[in-house]
Image: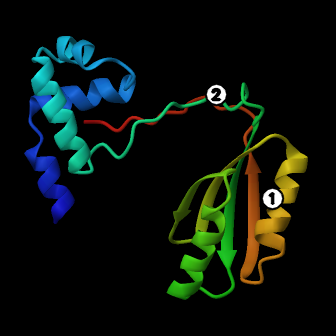
Amino acid sequence: MQSQSVISSLDELDKRILTILQHDAAMTNQQLAELVHASAPTCLRRVKRLVDQGVIARQVAILNPEKMGAALTAIVEITLDAQSSERMVEFERLVGTEQAVQQCYRVSPGPDFVLVIQVNDMAAYHLLAHRLFASHANVRNVRSFFSVLRSKFETRIAV
């Protein structure tokens, strides 16, 4: 299995680099090198290799949704009427084009999909729900949960 071979090829320096970058990827290469106790050229080569291997998928800024006017988080379970592979991919493409849909998971057992949606308010959610779910012929059931408090949000993976 390819991903297992990448994991087994990570040494302690790679793991230190990944741990630090998950906390703050905006630091300079020199700062990273100092924190992981390696030379700057070594860190640069290691990070490039980790990107090339797909271990580092991308480096992004994580915005505060409330500061950006997207204060309502909805976790939505979707059950489709027809669950053929083509219909699942069709639904994934539909929600994949919508910026408010931050995450989409195929799940089992239970509903077919779980979505995490970030919108301005309940009116924006209703518009989105109508556009994506109510008017989509293959959606059988929608069950929505609305966050009242986000007590933890993390993007880091244990290394």
Q: Position of residue 2 (x, y in %)?
A: 17, 62
Q: Which residue is mark 1?
A: 128
**111 relative to 72, above or below:** below
**130 relative to 73, above or below:** below
The span from disc 1 to disc 2 (Cα, nearest Å) is: 21 Å
Amino acid at the residue labelled 1: Leu
Q: Is residue 38 left or right of residue 29?
A: left
Residue drawn 83% across the image and 72% down it: 134
**Quick one: which residue is furthest to the right in this view?**
123
Instruction: Identify the secondary structure beneath mark 1.
Output: helix
Residue drawn 62% across the image and 74% down it: 91
Residue drawn 69% across the image and 58% down it: 76
Q: Position of residue 146 (x, y in %)?
A: 76, 46
**67 relative to 82, above or below:** above
Q: Which residue is mark 2?
A: 64
Give neighbour class at mark 2: few <14, some 14-19, many 20+ (Cα, 10 Å). Answer: few
**Residue 70 or residue 59, whichever sits in front:** 59
Amino acid at the residue labelled 2: Asn
For residue 18, say whether it is visible.
yes
Contact (Cβ within 8 Å) of mark 1 with mark 2: no
Query: Which quarter of the figure is the N terminus placed in?
Result: bottom left
For residue 112, say whether it is visible.
no
Query: Which quarter of the figure is the C terminus placed in?
Result: top left
Q: Is residue 127 left or right of residue 108?
A: right
Q: Position of residue 139 (x, y in %)?
A: 73, 78
Instruction: Identify the secondary structure beneath mark 2.
Output: loop
